[in-house]
Image: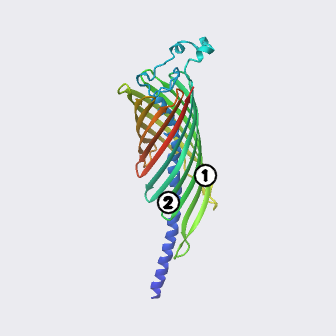
Amino acid sequence: MRALLVLAALALLTSSFQFVSTKSVSAQSLLDEHAFYRFYGLRRHNDIQGVEAVFDDYRRNWLQRYNSQILIGSGVNRGQSDTPYCTMRTAADRSRMTMANCGGAHIFRANVSGFTASDSLDGRTTEETGAIGYLGYEFLVSDDLFIGLGATLGQTSMQHRLGGSRMDVEGRETGAHLVGGYRFKNKSMLAWNISYIMATDDVTRTNNVMLNAIAPTPSTVTGSYDSNTIAVTGVWYKSYDLSERARVSLGIDYTLLHVGRSIFFDSNGVRNKVDDQWRGDFTTSLMFTRDFTDGELFFRIGNTFERLNPSHRHVDFTGDIGGSLKLTDTIALTASVGSTFRFDGFSEYRGSARALLKF
């Protein structure tokens, strides 16, 4: 009988030790999962919530240097200059009077996107809500060439869970973007951007630690972690007319991204370091547009697949539908809703509103 009691006590101690070990592994797994998940979150600044929305306006071909108005709903007149005299003049010949009739070279824009996302893989679950705002300026050098600057601000809340461990994250992000593009005469264009995004995450991790064999006790650890991302993208677009008021644009781009994380210390003094990440991926997209009087509807579908250091979630599919309305010759509004689905249980739903001024 005494031997049975000793064996039972040893079994109980072993199970308690295993419980603590499992929870420790769970805490580190959540930290690794957050670093992996954060990679895709920071990339939003380079996607449709940020820089890609700028390119979508140009691929729809309603921003021209030598036009006196925004060309939304212009149908067959889209892309045709209505200031031919100015296009024939050299810069040295233009007077102050003729410059007033040479179209609008300045683009100011403001975009805001809200999103909610969820993720589930190998017992881990993540829920996220957040928003990204974009402010930008582009200078139309000519009908063919534009250059610009942009800035993004982001705020996000995440909850990661695995077993008895939980990690709550409040993230703040700031991005700077240099953009440009050149339009060819065969209805194709090249566009590019270089982006730098910084993020700070305030993290609270709660782990259930088995102090005795009866009940777990929560242990809370806090920390603040910094990360940064560099993204370089090159894009090629080609447009095809389907009818006088409908067209489709094919897009292919490659993006190279690097995410770095600084060494940080938790409130319990533990030193942490998450490895840097390098990724490269191709994105293909189709955008369909249909013109109406002073407006248009568009539908965009896309597919991204990683080609440099691909992860186990190396493919996603996106879709967005929306419309643009020309309020005046110089002001336009755009709104859209969309979603993204990635392999292994990731999904995102988003909505955006954009305002643009051309003069």
Mark number displayed over residue 251? none
Q: Position of residue 235 (x, y in %)?
A: 47, 32
Which structural element holds mark 1?
strand
Residues under numbered marks 1 and 2 in contact, where contact means CB atoms less than 8 Å apart: no
Which structural element holds mark 2?
strand
Q: Is residue 313 left or right of residue 150?
A: left
Q: CA distance from mark 1 to mark 2?
A: 19 Å
Q: Nearer the viewer, residue 301 or 270?
A: 301
Q: Earlier in the sequence, mark 1 or mark 2?
A: 2
Q: Nearer the viewer, residue 139 or 326?
A: 326
Q: Amino acid at mark 1?
A: Tyr
Q: Position of residue 26 (x, y in %)?
A: 50, 62
Q: Quadrant of residue 1?
A: bottom left
- For image coordinates 41% across by 44% down, the residue present is 315
Q: Quadrant of residue 265?
A: bottom right
Q: Residues within 10 Å of mark 2 (few under 14, many from 20)?
A: many
Residue 197 higher or lower than 57, as above or below: below
Q: Amino acid at mark 2?
A: Arg
Looking at this rendering, what residue extends furthest in the left direction?
242
Determine which residue is flagged by label 2.
161
Q: Position of residue 285 (x, y in %)?
A: 41, 36
Q: Nearer the viewer, residue 71 or 201?
A: 71
Residue 152 higher or lower than 147, as above or below: below
Determine which residue is flagged by label 1.
225
Residue 244 higher or lower than 25, as above or below: above
Q: Position of residue 223 (x, y in %)?
A: 62, 56
- For image coordinates 38% across by 29% down, the residue present is 246
